[in-house]
Image (spheres, rainbow, N blue to C red):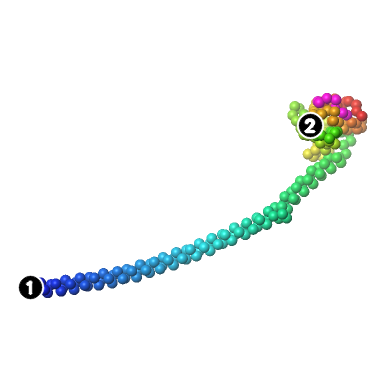
Amino acid sequence: MANSEEETPLLFKIMIVLIIIAAVFGAFMGIVNLSLIKMNAKEIEDINTVMDKSINVKISKIENEISSIDASLRPGGMIDLYINAYHYLSNSKIDLQKIVTLAQDEKGKDFFSIYVTGTNEVWIGVMKDGKYVFQSEVTPGLSPQKFYVNCTPSVSTSYTITLNSSSIVMSGSPLNTYILIHTDRGVRLLRMNSRTMNVNEMLSEGGY
């Protein structure tokens, strides 16, 4: 009985010691885990700060680009100025080509222009070697095109067209279509007598 009573306090003491060791170990691990959590939280906070700065920089850059594009698109902006300049230069180029075409000294060359009367546009087509070299609805008045027969202009422009004697001129309204012919014999005005006329026939016919 005595030995049994002595063993019981010993086991109890061992259990108390184990409980204390487990409590100390648990407290230690809790402190370690808390430290790790704090470290991870700091790292996450640092990463979030860096990402926020990067995102803010990109957002600011995008906002600046949008403001720049918006300013360019507004009336009087850079794009508007470019478009106006392009249209101005394009129109100036066309007008300059008209002036050059009309101002050329073409003595000794056979060429003609087309004159449309009335108030309506007239379809005019000119074929050379079976292919259209000119086809358009011509407004009333003298067309800016010059058609050169068996010769070339002194200066070629978008309004100068070279033909041969077998070329053909067609009109949707012959009664309203006149041909202003320039040759070494002078200038004469010829009204088309049919919807289709051969260039050689036009040059050889008389006129007004």
Q: Secondary structure at mark 2?
A: strand
Q: Quadrant of the N terminus?
A: bottom left
Specify whether residue 107 is in view: yes
Q: Residue at x 38, y 69 (%)?
A: 35
Q: Is residue 119 left or right of residue 19?
A: right
Q: Quadrant of residue 138?
A: top right
For the record, the magenta segment spans 190-196
Q: Residue at x 59, y 61 (%)?
A: 60
Local packing at callout 1 (Cα closer than 10 Å; few below 14, some 14-19, many 20+) is few
Residue behind mark 1: 1
Q: Is residue 132 left or right of residue 103?
A: left
Q: Quadrant of the C terminus?
A: top right
- What is the number of the mark on residue 123? 2
Q: In the rendered view, tell whether residue 190 sits above or below residue 84.
A: above
Specify whether residue 164 is in view: no
Q: Quadrant of residue 105?
A: top right
Instruction: Give the CA distance from mark 1 to mark 2.
Output: 136 Å
Residue type pointed to by label 1? Met
Local packing at callout 2 (Cα closer than 10 Å; few below 14, some 14-19, many 20+) is some
Residue 24 in the image, given as x and y percentages of width and height: 28, 72
Q: Quadrant of residue 133?
A: top right
Work out whether mark 1 precedes mark 2 in sequence or the reverse, and give the earlier one.
Answer: 1
Q: Nearer the viewer, mark 1 or mark 2?
A: 1
